[in-house]
Amino acid sequence: MFTLSRRCLLALVTLAIWSASMQQADAQAQSPGLFFSHISWKLCMDTARGRGFYDPKFPLVCEQTREPGYVGFKLTTSFAIYRNPITTSTALFQDIARDVTAYQQNTGGCRDAGTCTLVMLQFPLVNNVPQTNDKLNERRIGFREGQGDASTLPNPTAQGDSSERINCLTSPGGCSSGIRFVIDSISRENPVAGTYNNPSWSYVPRMIVYAHFSFDHFFVQPTLGSPPKVYTVFFEGCCRPGTQGGTHDMVLLSGKGTPWHVRTEVVIGRDEAQYAGLPTSSFSFEPAMDIVQLPHGQNTNCQTKMTFFLQGYHPEDAFEPLTTYAHATENQMGLYKCLEHGTRNNPQSPLEPDKSTNNGQAICTLAETYRQELQRTRTGVVVNGITGRSIDYNIQNPGYRYVGIVASTQTQVPGENTQNIVLRTQVDFLVRVWETNNLVNDAPDQLTNLPPLPFYDPMLVGATANTAPTYDNPIKMECGKPKFMLNGYEEEYIRVRFRDADNGGACIQGEGLLHNQKLEWIGNTHTLPPGATMTQTMVPMQSRLWDQYVELRWQPKCEDRSTVGRFLFCFAAQDELNEGGANPILQTSLPAEYYPSFSYSSPARLQGPFMAAPAASGQCCNLLGSTECCNHVQNPSCLYVHVEPPKPNPTPPITAARGNNFNQPCLAPGVCNATTPCAGQDQSVVVEQVFELEMFSMSENDLLPLDLVVTFQDAAGNTVGTPTNMNVTKFYGCNGEWGAPGCSATRDEDNQNDVAVQIRYGAPRTVAEATFDKICVQGRQLLDDVDEEAWVETWGFAPNNDTCQVCFRLVVVDKPSFFGATQPRESNFDVRIGEERSLDIIGRGRLNRISILVLPDPGAPIGSSLTEQQIAQEPTFWTVQRTFRFAPQVGQEGQVFRVCFVVRNEDDSGSRPLYSDALCWNFRVPKLTLGWTGIGTGPESRSCEWAGERPCCPTTTVQPATVGCTQHFDVVATKYNFADQQRYTQGYPVQPFFFVQHPACTNPENCPIVLSVQGCGEGVTGPCCGNGVCDGAETGSNCPADCEPDTVSLVTETDENEFQQGSFSFSPNRQQQGRTLLVCIGAEPAAADGGAAVIVQERQACYAPSLCFIFRVDSCKYCVPQGKTLKSIARHYFLNVDWLRLYNSNPAVRDPDGLLTEEVIQVGPLYTVQSGDTLLSIAAKTRTTVRSLMENNPALPPDGMIQPDDRICVLVCSAA
């Protein structure tokens, strides 16, 4: 026994749809009303967006009516029943105790074979007589034209309301004999094992039954050119219970004794094209919602509202964001049953009490009272339309209160005259606030009367909010596979976890307070879809009975249409208090975490996405006098799960890897036909050798296990056993490569669509010992646990897609070979352009048909040929001889061509040919590089560095030059094989040296100065050859079109096999002074030998197609010609320059009349251009003329535009 130091307020908000409220007058069982009632719909016809309506419990619905106009409906209910009788004259179900007990006992005593059903009567029974005149208490399913309150009877002139009734053909005898609901499940609210009638059921005398009923109906379609039609389908009756006391725990604050009316609005198009912008199904408040319990603190400031969420979604993704929510009106919550339009065919006429179907008397004599009661249901209730399905609810007063919600989905009719249509689906439910007082002196046995307190954590967010399983980011599954997938993680189960809300040990330090409290059960709040299972044994978390979980597993069947699509899985838990617990020791220090939680957890890979996060504040509210508030937003403990339909399943291809003597056979996907696959594609194996073949198959769809079945046949086509020395090995997950990482000898769900087989056969010693003729292979998808007939009926195609059986002969034979004068395998031959190489090939074999063939891979090069075959018969074998010839052509230089030959041997029977081992030769067509030396005869001589066994002389050099001075060079060009850099002496004689036209030296690594002589043309800027001006690096040798001939000499002296030698001399003229010139000497073989094509044209450090000289010609310096004096030089070259000025500018000259030949003299100073200088200003400063400056500085631009720091040769006082 224990006491609590303060009053404890437990506010339990019970969310349950209470669409009807009729009681059963059975002595053992009574039903005070439906907890949940909701109508959803879907078109019967298949559309591009999915399959039509299907319910495996009602297979006749829509079975034969899958065309426009037919709609399938599902009426889902849940209701509470009590053991103790309730005094009433109305009966909702017929013999409910019998049906519920039969379902619980599962003894085969249900009304229908294999299915447990409940019969809801259309009219209440009095002495077993239906009260057909009792229109108020009548339960009926019907429809009206139009939407909601503005709808009218389909046939206003008909008597009564017969025209609006829907004949429930799926219920035996129609609706008049009762609507036959299928029992889906029964809650575990009673803590005692056994059946409903167990007399020891001592507290919580209530259980909740979940059931549903499906039916279809045809609606008149719109005519051509008309907009879609809208109908309202409803289920209604009377009445909700009045205030009940005692064991029934019912204190109604609103809606007492009112009728109920559940409706949904259906849009009917003419054909599938008109449904382009319309939904083909309704919003669904499913699955049926059970009890959601929320804590509330004792602080009076907290007793204002709590927030919870509705369970539901729109099955079509496009319409989910177009759905909004609002509070239902009194008419939508049930008052409409009492009303009808004053003018029955005018939807705009006022609604009045309905007297037409009750002998002129109003059906509801208390219609205004009902209106007032239903108005009270809206007090203190707010629907938050911004956040979606969240509801803020006032919980100040204990008791029951009805809440009605309408989900409105907006759409637009396609076509020119667009029209908005808003389809509404309503639901009303019961909210319960329950308060327990004066617990201070209660005894433990009295505490057993406390109701169960399951607790839900609202936030299924994991690490961040965007990882939560939501409508837009559901947990995904593929039909046929038992795996839950979210955010890149997957697992075969989900752990459903609850923590006990009122266990003091979870909040108070130590395990003292209420430590004997524990969870009794965790379960689903609705019927699980077919194949889904929940473990019944709860596993404690960290050995704590108040923190436990169970596991959910599911493998949805592809052939069951009801397991494909979007689902909500919702869960609840119940605790219990064990008697005899120790007295608690109250503690005042609270730990940081106490927020009884509900979560979906799994192994470490999935804990992030599924694990719930505890609240950050108010964690110990509602316990032991805590003044903290508990206004946490509560989500229903539900998960969105989306099951994908089966993927496309094309025929799995079969491929084969290389094996001994194996060429790819005709193993390919396709439809089997009369032609035997792979006929004539026989294989062979030589006696006493091994034949190996690896075959692979991978199906695009990994739902079904794939197998490669290998069989053997004799020559007559009969199947025989596995031959001796034949080994067949299978692996899985090889991804087309035998022995690749991931290959496994064990098949599992991850590799079952990827199979490899290795066939290894050791041939016998003789051909006669072979015991089989053919090997046959077929890829088969295995139908493990798949109902093939149901699959075909559901999807219209077979689940599996096997390949053809492909067979090929494996013939044991001898092997042909090469012999005689044939060159060895892997020989290498050098063949240059202009040369032909001939090689003889000889083969032999034991069969009379023999030939030598070139293998297509790599084939034979252009310029090769093979002579006709010469066949001869020897005593024990046949021989064949052919000659292979190869003459390379221009364009093949620098390449290596591999040519392979085989000997093919066969007889006249048409059996698989035999092939020898391949004979392969390599033909190399050389490409040359040129190494250069250009050694001057004077002090300008260059050194030449050696690299290995060959010199590495610069291919470009910079030479100073002076006008009138002649430079001489000995030039040598040496040939090297580009492939190995060895000297080449086998041909390609080099022709005489020549000057390269338009030379270029543009690689800074090999060109001390980057220069080029470019031809004039489109896009060329700057100096160019062809513009009529000798400028840039141009000379008479490289651009005769613009420049006068140079003083130059180029002589080829010797023509050796491996090198070319000659001499080169150059003397710059007066017009070249101050310029940098580029002169290149080239060499190449004759055109018949390939010409320039056989020379590597790239300029490198040690070799190049030409030897280049960069001459930097001095300004204001001249070489003295033979026999000249200063006076003759001044008169001949400079005219108006006094020879004394030359004499004064050259102090080293002692005798002006005795100059040395090629002695360099200075003809004037070099002036450095300053900022602001012009040729005119410089001429004025130096007493010369602009013309003189231009003549003595040919490197100046023609326009005379000079730049600072330019150097100009000046003949001072030359204007005198």
Image (tube, rainbow, N blue to C red):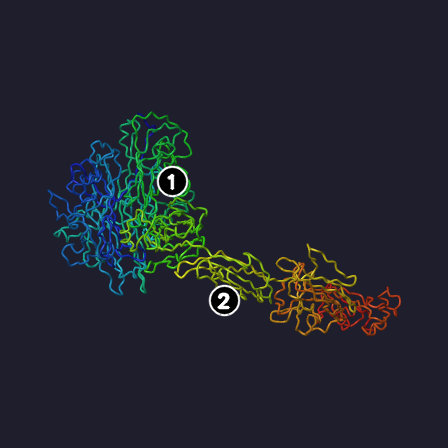
Image-quadrant location for residue 586: top left
Quarter occupied by the C terminus: bottom right
- Secondary structure, mark 1, is strand
Q: Which mark is residue 601?
A: 1
Task: Give above or below for 153 relative to 600.
Answer: below
Quarter occupied by the N terminus: top left
Which kind of residue does numbered mark 2 sit on? Answer: Glu
Q: Nearer the viewer, residue 472 or 139?
A: 472
For residue 1192, side relative to residue 743 (left or right): right
Q: Which mark is residue 1177?
A: none
Badge 1 crowding class, 10 Å Cα cut-off, few under 14, some 14 to 19, many 20 or more, is: many
Task: Give above or below for 656 relative to 1050.
Answer: above
Badge 2 crowding class, 10 Å Cα cut-off, few under 14, some 14 to 19, many 20 or more, is: few
For residue 680, side relative to residue 207 (left or right): right
Closest to the camera, between mark 2 and mark 1, is 2
Q: Nearer the viewer, residue 473 or 948?
A: 948
Is residue 1199 visible from the viewing direction of this image?
no
**Residue 1018: percent from left, percent from top:** 60, 71
The Cα atoms of the two marked residues, 2 and 1, are separated by 78 Å
Which numbered disc, 2 or 1, marks the residue that appears first in the sequence? 1
**Residue 41: percent from left, percent from top:** 26, 52
Residue drawn at the location 37% of the way across and 57% of the way down: 669
For residue 658, side relative to residue 254 (left or right): right
Q: To which residue does mark 2 refer?
A: 868
Is residue 752 visible from the viewing direction of this image?
yes
Which kind of residue does numbered mark 1 sit on? Answer: Ser
Residue drawn at the location 38% of the way across and 51% of the way down: 770
Task: Give above or below for 255 relative to 1002.
Answer: above
Image-quadrant location for residue 963: bottom right
